[in-house]
Image (spheres, helix red, strand yellow):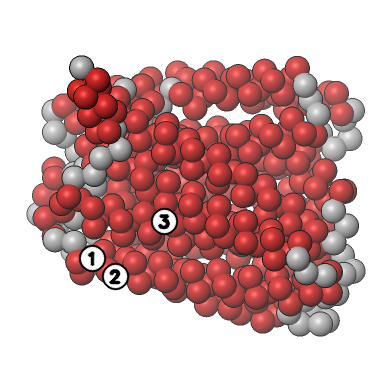
């Protein structure tokens, strides 16, 4: 009996031999992308706060939409022109080159971070923030769109937790090394160290491209089909050039599908609910971080430690929670776990509204999202068409998160003149309301997902037919 029990427990983390290469390279890719992310994100907040001003972060989130929307339109056209892994190459090359360029200018003694005079007219600080917002918008979207297209629901249930664990390992190592490097150097050394860290992030991106190349060349095609019904639909799908106007309008296909398809609009709502809550908590933590860390190096160190904790906790959740839970209770029930835990953390914040609690709750929310909520939510995309996986997903994740952050930023700005007690009560009331709506929504999304899998249907197939007729 004991042997049978041990065998069952062991199966919760087992990987079939024929899937090991695929799981390894996808996990390695996410690990390298996450190494870059946890280096760049602390730099984004610290550099903008000390070059431009932390009080302008809500404004920057609003203006970043003007940068992200054109990127989404370009990405939507690339979906029509390029193969799945080529989209990843484009994302990686664009941001790797951008990272090298910004590392050069940020090291400049006059225009860069060595100039400690914060001003709203520091153009480089604004441009750097927008560039980083674009990276954040597409970083996980691009990876998960590719992963969703080469895995079926059973693969996702069995192996998505491993992909996330890989990303958490990368996050722990990179953020820990960044934190230690800053702590071991002087303030004057930070003006060289931080641009170099940005450059190292670019190297990590290029290495991730190498991992994707190894995946597509070494893993047999039969293991790269993903959801078979969607794969077969894509093979037999006609692609006509159509008129120039139709070609231009096809860049908006994802937005049109998102609006017309309740299932996709529901996923958009999940993204929006989470991002609004995060922006609210992030604002409180950012103000405290800016006030308690006088230099760009000190603030980067603060956020590096924050991401170290986030990834350390996330690794435990993804390995001991995500993988076993998806295998034991399935995707549909797993979708409820994050909003239920959100309710618990909101109650704790209401009872103990201190800076330390806000920091702890923010770390916990992000760790749970990246390690459990996000990979579970990604399963919702698997039985969908390519246009939903790539085009609509980009509008849902990239545009949806920016819209939600903009809403959250407007909400934060509207509370600037309010008393701390009223601002806190308003923030928590909004968060409670969103979480209750979340619980209702995941019930219907989970039901639709299960019906599609049971009947071997492709969600959004009618949308693709419409797209074909107009292109």
Mark 3 — residue? 30
Labels 2 and 3 touching (C-beta < 8 A) = no
What is the x, y in percent for residue 391?
Answer: 36, 52
Q: Quadrant of residue 434?
A: top right
Instruction: Calculate the distance from the C-alpha at mark 1 to the C-alpha at mark 2.
Output: 5 Å
Mark 2 — residue? 213
Q: Quadrant of residue 275?
A: top right
Instruction: Calculate the distance from the C-alpha at mark 2 to the C-alpha at mark 3.
Output: 14 Å
Q: Tell me if 152 is positioned left or right of 264 in this view.
A: left
The crowd level at tag 3 (other Cα within 10 Å; few <14, some 14-19, many 20+) is many
Q: Residue at left 42%, top 46%?
A: 164
In the rendered view, tell whether residue 125 sits above or below residue 136.
below
Under circle 2, the secondary element is helix
Q: Quadrant of residue 441?
A: top left
In the rendered view, tell whether residue 57 sits above or below residue 325.
below
Under circle 3, the secondary element is helix
The crowd level at tag 2 (other Cα within 10 Å; few <14, some 14-19, many 20+) is some
Labels 1 and 2 touching (C-beta < 8 A) = yes
N-terminal of the two: label 1 or label 3? 3
Residue situated in front as seen by the camera: 172 or 134: 172
Q: Tell me if 185 is positioned left or right of 332 in this view.
A: right
Q: Residue at left 89%, top 35%?
A: 417
Q: Residue at left 55%, top 35%?
A: 274
- Picture quarter with the N terminus: top left
What is the x, y in percent for residue 4?
Answer: 20, 23
Mark 1 — residue? 216
Q: Tell me if 441 is positioned left or right of 109 in this view.
A: left
């Amino acid at each position: 009996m004991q042997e049978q029990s041990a065998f069952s427990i062991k199966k919760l983390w087992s990987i079939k031999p024929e899937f090991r290469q695929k799981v390894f390279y996808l996990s390695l890719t996410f690990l390298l992308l996450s190494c870059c992310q946890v280096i760049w994100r602390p730099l984004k907040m610290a550099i903008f706060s000390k070059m431009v001003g932390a009080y302008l972060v809500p404004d920057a989130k609003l203006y970043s939409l003007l940068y992200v929307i054109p990127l989404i339109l370009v990405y939507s056209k690339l979906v029509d022109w390029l193969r799945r892994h080529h989209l990843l190459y484009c994302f990686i090359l664009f941001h790797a080159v951008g990272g090298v360029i910004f590392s050069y200018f940020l090291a400049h003694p006059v225009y860069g971070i060595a100039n400690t005079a914060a001003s709203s007219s520091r153009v480089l600080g604004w441009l750097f923030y927008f560039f980083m917002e674009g990276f954040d918008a597409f970083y996980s979207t691009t990876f998960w769109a590719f992963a969703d297209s080469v895995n079926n629901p059973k693969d996702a249930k069995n192996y998505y937790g491993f992909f996330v664990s890989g990303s958490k390992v990368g996050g722990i190592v990179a953020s820990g090394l960044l934190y230690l490097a800053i702590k071991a150097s002087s303030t004057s050394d930070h003006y060289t160290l931080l641009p170099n860290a940005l450059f190292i992030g670019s190297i990590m991106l290029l290495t991730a491209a190498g991992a994707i190349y190894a995946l597509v060349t070494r893993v047999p095609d039969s293991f790269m089909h993903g959801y078979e019904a969607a794969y077969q639909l894509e093979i037999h799908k006609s692609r006509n050039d159509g008129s120039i106007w139709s070609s231009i309008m096809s860049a908006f296909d994802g937005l049109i599908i998102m609006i017309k398809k309740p299932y996709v609009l529901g996923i958009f709502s999940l993204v929006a609910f989470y991002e609004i809550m995060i922006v609210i908590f992030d604002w409180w933590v950012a103000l405290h971080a800016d006030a308690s860390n006088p230099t760009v190096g000190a603030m980067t160190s603060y956020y590096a430690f924050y991401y170290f904790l986030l990834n350390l906790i996330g690794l435990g959740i993804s390995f001991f929670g995500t993988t076993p839970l998806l295998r034991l209770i399935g995707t549909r029930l797993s979708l409820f776990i994050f909003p239920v835990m959100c309710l618990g953390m909101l109650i704790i914040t209401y009872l103990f509204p201190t800076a330390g609690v806000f920091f702890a709750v923010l770390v916990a929310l992000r760790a749970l999202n990246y390690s459990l909520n996000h990979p579970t939510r990604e399963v919702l995309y698997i039985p969908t068409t390519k246009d939903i996986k790539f085009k609509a997903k980009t509008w849902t994740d990239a545009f949806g998160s920016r819209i939600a952050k903009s809403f959250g930023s407007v909400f934060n700005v509207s509370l600037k003149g309010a008393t701390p007690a009223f601002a806190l009560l308003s923030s928590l009331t909004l968060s409670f309301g969103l979480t209750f709506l979340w619980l209702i929504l995941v019930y219907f999304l989970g039901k639709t997902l299960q019906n599609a899998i049971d009947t071997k249907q492709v969600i959004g197939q009618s949308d693709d037919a419409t797209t074909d007729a107009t292109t």
